[in-house]
Amino acid sequence: MKNDREKVIVKTSVLGIIGNVFLVAFKAFVGILAGSIAIIMDAVNNFTDALSSTITIAGTKLAGKKPDKKHPYGYGRIEYLTSTLIAVLILFAGGMAVVESVKSIIDHFQNGTMPSFEVYSIVIVAVAIGVKIAIGLFFRQRGKSIESDALEASGMDALFDSVLSTATLVGVIVAKFANVYIEGYLGIAIGLFILKSGFEVMRESLSSMIGDRYERDHIVAIKEEINSIEGVRGCYDLILNNYGHDRNIGSVHIGVSDTLTAKDIQAIERKIALLMYKKYNTIMTVGIYADNQSDQASREIFEKVCETVKKHSTVLQTHGFYVDLSEKVISFDLVISFDDPDPEGTICAIKQETEQQNEGYQVFVQYDQDFSLSE
């Protein structure tokens, strides 16, 4: 499956390189012939697209390298770096479009220069736009189908270029048939649009490298499947770390009865690990919370804790509750929302109230990060 995905990315990128090289040749020829800086810059844009496809191929090959001693989690995150480099190319193209358009406007006012086009040149540019749109849509479709951020970014770059080329074509037609200069102004407007889009691609790729929160539907589906396994009384603290496309290492805590043997617990853990590896391509570590609310005293203490926690709206979940009646120890975990300006203060208040309600008991409260609970 991984090899098939790599082949699709490489094949798609090679086709993009071939298409863009032809466009560079066509547009450079027409731009030089007509003396249009806009079309020449369009050719440069296509060259950066060919370069971005080359980067995508290199990034995909590097990301596919096997884990080794220095990088035991593999090289999959290189794909995110690839997307970032492509974002830089988009920003470069947008910046160049703005700069050269400003130069063109200044030259027009100082020297009265106007681009000179033949009808065949206009036809060539129009055909080139159609080709560019096709390349962009093709890359986007392939990128979405195999979940490749780099291909999607390249496709977006190509579609932006087609918009820029369309603006150039409009400027050419207006200049030829109405003798009115507008291509420089159009170039600035489109260049600013490309810059905005480049920053968006950059933001997404950097966010992936830092570590995005998984979609809530994905998390809910995993928790439901784990909870459906016999013997599991709750699924908590689900953490997934991404190391490239479809490569995850994670951890989760489950609640089980405190009457189970180590052998019983290991059987449950194996089922969860197998489920996560086969269905979600995730190497999962499973931690255990022993549910010991079987006696009346423990249940009463737990109910008091729940009443205390309800007073604090930023507490998303209480779990891992355990009471040692002989040692007089109470422990539980709290998941606090990122919206809480003082999570340590919230935990301290709950801890103090629990101690007051249960005189003579030591209370331990674990602060858990909100990795997946909130919307």
Image: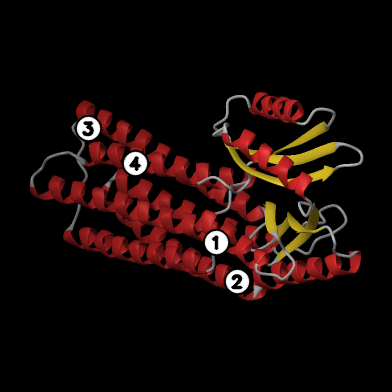
Secondary structure category for the residue under label 2: helix
Looking at the picture, how far across and down is residue 199, in whole percent? 46, 40
Which numbered mark, 4 or 3, is in the foreground of this view?
Answer: 4
Q: Which mark is residue 270?
A: none
Mark 3–mark 2 CB contact (< 8 Å): no
The mark nearer the N terminus, 3 or 1, is 3
Looking at the picture, how far across and down is residue 83, in whole percent? 56, 51
Q: Which residue is mark 1?
A: 148
The amino acid sitting under disc 1 is Ser
How is the protein colored in the picture? secondary structure
Quarter occupied by residue 223: bottom right
Residue 138 relative to residue 76: left or right: left
Which numbered mark, 2 or 4, is in the foreground of this view?
Answer: 2
The amino acid sitting under disc 3 is His
The mark nearer the N terminus, 4 or 3, is 3
Secondary structure category for the residue under label 4: helix
Which numbered mark, 4 or 1, is in the foreground of this view?
Answer: 1
